[in-house]
Image: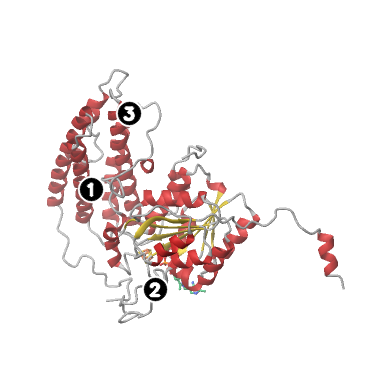
């Protein structure tokens, strides 16, 4: 890795606010992975902004020393897009949960993939709304039965990686919080890759989905190399069972970045508003 | 890693590890003779640091969730591992810091002595914390024994690894003794009269 050596250890990216997550929550490891990735990349906290929505996972910016924006439920991506366009020199990481990103924020997810702004989007997917006490989310299995959804929802799950590919995301990967070093490498790769990079991180909610402790026995490295061919990636992702880890697609689309110089002089614009 | 007096009296100075001592008996000051043994000790150092960090995080989590007894125990475990890491560093007298834990390849998702994050429960008892520490020592032993057994391992490293594996077995014995002195958790230890889950 040819990162400039800032000499900063992962600890330098951790704030002194202690997370209020439930003991055992997978999000602790995602926090560790983010801080390790930033150290690997040789970045400094003031060169990074972490933008989130609402949910347990969305608390993550406060636990880092980077710039942070704990925004509105489902609206992390538009806020981050604006920030990256206005301050292209910042490394902008967007973080949140499956509820935040695929339910209320689902529409923004599609368009962020389509726009392909140079962002890294980390979704801590626990197949449940943790913060609001365990309601099913778009990625919840149809048969998962709980007091809030007796007998399960009976509704087919959302497949975020397939949707991301179809919508134009330029980098698609899956990590597992039980492998924080592997996640750190994925995050570092995602940040390096130009355009919209999407990393789904399976992160167990031990309180509402204690069954997810078994994920550690289900995950496995994807038995394939990353591809830049969307058709191949589509076949791969359509048959994926949700537990293949690694980089699954690395595209070549140029990221969207508006011209830095104004294309029209202010006086010209003002003329159009003249009455 | 946990020696008898380290576990019983964590504040006491930890005795030197025979493996590290052996490795330190090298021509240039106290650094080991070969590159392979240096790399091996760097890995052992990364294991200690990572284990210490994880125990520290566990202690924080337990403090936040008002489980001071278990928090104190994890803090002790973190201190013990941290001291071991420091000891390796001093003994090896590396001219520059060894690579961080994430820069090394591990066969397991995390270094063998690091406890998985999901093993915690907010109502756990000290006995559970030691059960976690015991599993960590067991994994560490398997790791070192595997290195010691492998025909691909250079001879001097095999010897170091065998010593380490032996140490880990000793640590397990000490933790078992410690656990035997603690009350066994009641069968309904995790029952919360005001549970977070609306489920059953
Ligand atoms: C506009 C709005 N609608 C609903 C909510 C309630 N709410 C808070 S967090 C959340 C879902 C969180 O789930 P997820 O994003 O999966 O995060 P997790 O807590 O599981 O990490 C909901 C519905 C809200 N805060 N704002
Ligand atoms: S409710 Fe679930 S997602 Fe939220 S902090 Fe607890 S374990 Fe983590």
Residue A16 shows up from this direction: no
In the structure shown, which secondary structural element does the residue marked by tag 1 occupy?
Answer: helix
The residue that label 2 is drawn on is A157
Horizontal placement of A76 versus B188: left or right?
A: right
Mark 2, other Cα within 10 Å: few <14 / some 14–19 / many ≥20: some
Say which of marks 3 and 2 sits in front. 2
The N terminus of chain B lies in which quarter of the figure? top left
For residue B87, which quarter of the picture? top left
Disc number lying in front (1 or 2) = 2
Residue at 44% x, 60% y: name it.
A232
- Closer to the camera, B106 or A27? B106
Question: Do the residues at pointers 1 and 3 share their chain?
Answer: yes
B91 up-or-down from B69: above or below: above
Marks counted in the figure total 3
Q: Which residue is mark 1?
A: B136
Residue, x 53% and y 68% (percent of image)? A110
**Chain name for mark 3:** B
């Amino acid at each position: 890795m040819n990162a400039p050596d800032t000499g900063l250890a992962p600890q330098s990216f951790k704030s002194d606010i202690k997370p209020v997550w439930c003991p055992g929550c997978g999000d602790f490891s995602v926090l560790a992975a983010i801080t390790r990735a930033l150290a690997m990349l040789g970045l400094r906290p003031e060169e990074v902004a972490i933008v989130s929505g609402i949910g347990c996972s969305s608390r993550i910016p406060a636990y880092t020393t980077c710039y942070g924006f704990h925004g509105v439920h489902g609206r992390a991506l538009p806020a981050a897009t604006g920030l990256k366009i206005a301050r292209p020199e910042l490394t902008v990481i967007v973080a949140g949960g499956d509820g935040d990103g695929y339910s209320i924020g689902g529409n923004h997810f599609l368009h962020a993939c389509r726009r392909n702004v140079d962002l890294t989007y980390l979704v801590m997917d626990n197949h449940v709304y943790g913060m609001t006490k365990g309601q099913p989310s778009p990625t919840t299995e149809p048969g998962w039965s709980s007091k809030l959804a007796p007998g399960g929802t009976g509704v087919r799950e959302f497949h975020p990686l397939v949707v991301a590919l179809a919508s134009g995301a330029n980098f698609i990967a899956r990590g597992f919080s039980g492998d924080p070093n592997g996640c750190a490498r994925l995050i570092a790769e995602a940040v390096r890759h130009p355009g919209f990079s999407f990393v789904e991180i399976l992160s167990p909610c031990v309180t509402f989905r204690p069954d997810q402790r078994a994920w550690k026995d289900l995950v496995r490295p994807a038995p394939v190399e990353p591809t830049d061919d969307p058709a191949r990636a589509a076949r791969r992702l359509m048959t994926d069972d949700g537990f293949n880890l690694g980089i699954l697609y690395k595209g070549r689309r140029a990221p969207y970045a508006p011209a830095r110089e104004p294309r029209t002089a202010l006086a010209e614009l003002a003329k159009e508003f003249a009455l | 890693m946990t020696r008898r007096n380290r576990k019983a009296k964590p504040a006491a100075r930890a005795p030197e590890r025979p493996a590290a001592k052996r490795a330190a008996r090298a021509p240039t000051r106290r650094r080991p003779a070969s590159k392979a043994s240096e790399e091996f000790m760097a890995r052992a150092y990364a294991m200690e640091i990572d284990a210490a960090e994880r125990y520290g995080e566990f202690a924080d989590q337990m403090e936040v969730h008002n489980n001071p007894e278990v928090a104190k125990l994890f803090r002790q475990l973190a201190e013990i591992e941290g001291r071991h890491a420091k000891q390796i560093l001093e003994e090896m007298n590396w001219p520059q810091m060894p690579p961080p834990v994430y820069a090394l390849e591990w066969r397991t998702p995390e270094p063998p002595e690091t406890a998985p994050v999901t093993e915690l429960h907010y109502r756990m008892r000290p006995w559970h914390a030691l059960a976690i520490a015991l599993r960590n020592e067991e994994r560490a032993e398997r790791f070192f024994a595997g290195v010691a057994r492998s025909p691909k391992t250079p001879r001097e490293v095999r010897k170091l690894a065998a010593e380490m594996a032996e140490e880990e077995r000793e640590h397990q014995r000490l933790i078992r003794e410690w656990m035997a002195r603690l009350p066994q958790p009641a069968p309904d230890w995790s029952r919360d009269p005001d549970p977070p889950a609306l489920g059953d």
